[in-house]
Image (cartoon, helix red, strand yellow):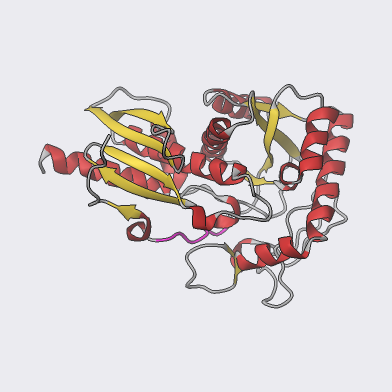
Amino acid sequence: MTSNQERGSVLRLAAERAILAPSIHNTQPWRFRIRDDALEMLVDPDRQLEVIDPGRRQLMISCGCALFNARVGVAASRYSATVERFPEPGDPDLFARVTLGEPEAPWTPLVRLDDAIERRRSNRREFFEHRVSEEILWELTAAAAAEDAVVVTTEAPDQRRILAELIREADAIENADPDYRAELHRWTTTMSTRSDGVSARSFPQHISHDADVPLRDFTDPTSGTGQMPPVTDSGLDQCLLVLGTATDDTLAWLRAGEALQRLWLEATRLDHVASLISQPVEVRQTRTSLRDELALTIWPQIVLRVGQAAPNVATRRRDLSDVLDASAPEPSR
């Protein structure tokens, strides 16, 4: 294998890792192209959720997760890399360029996360172990900090009560909106052949909206319910984390995605599961209240619960050939 072939294979592997990243409603809002020694990563604007994400904040968080996976793939191939975020000011859809450096790069902590990429799942099951040790929380907090993000653990009873109230408020606001329900159903599927969207195999038959911490209800009266056991116990004894950033701009959203994925892969490596509770940061008024009432000095980007649960099935992904252009000409610079 020639050096060019090897480097091309490393970039292709990075893209293969990137497509396994989580994304809001499994929209997979990304495209890739290989240019010489670089993997360029672009937004797919047709996959934006216009109702719950009109400002593209969650789209950029999703893309940040994909970028982190690509970084892990390169590190696991034992290459160094230079990462440029939004490298072309005139092309806001080009969110990252990962350029290969030298082979036989020194080991970094990213290498140990490579095996976790294929095992990571969004786990919407009931947790059989809610307690998360201080040691695990330290690992998760350090993972986010390595990507310029902050994790706030809601340990005080008043904090957990406020957070739960805001989750319920946002959940009720969203479910009362027919446009929200229509968008959600467009990205929910019972088709075994569909390569995107949230599969019925990966969400519960029933979600209690009266739970202390309601999970998102993907049930569609027209196409059926989830195929997992119902979740009847989602309470305040769960480990609830708020991940946030110092600023609230497009770059911060991308970095929040990188931090989220690093945290999630570390949790997976340590035999823990996570699922996102996005409702309170999707609704403007509850996101503002979350920051104010918890006296946060960061901008909350995501809320997630962490614990231990039975394994969940993997969501499907588009084929790499559907999102990767490896033959496009070199752009003028």
Locate residue 118, reporting x and y percent.
45, 49
Q: In the drawing, does residue 59 fall left or right of residue 330?
A: right
Left-right relation of 142 to 101: right
> In which quadrant is the C terminus drawn?
top left
Looking at this view, is 11 or 96 the one in front? 96
Q: Does the image show residue 155? A: no
* Quadrant location, the N terminus: top left
- Residue closer to the observer: 77 or 30: 30
Residue stretch rendered in magenta on the structure: 312-318
Q: Is residue 282 magenta?
A: no
- Res. 324 in view: yes
Position above or below: 186 against 82 = below
Image height of 310 relative to 200, above or below: above
Q: Main secondary structure of the magenta part?
A: loop
Residue drawn at (23%, 43%) of the image: 330
Residue 241: x, y in percent?
A: 71, 34
In percent of width and height, residue 288 lies at 79, 35
Quarter of the image for residue 242 reads top right
Point 82% across, 28% down: residue: 292
The quarter of the displayed image where residue 71 is located: top left
Q: Position of residue 177 (x, y in %)?
A: 79, 61
For this orientation, the residue located farthest to the bottom is 222
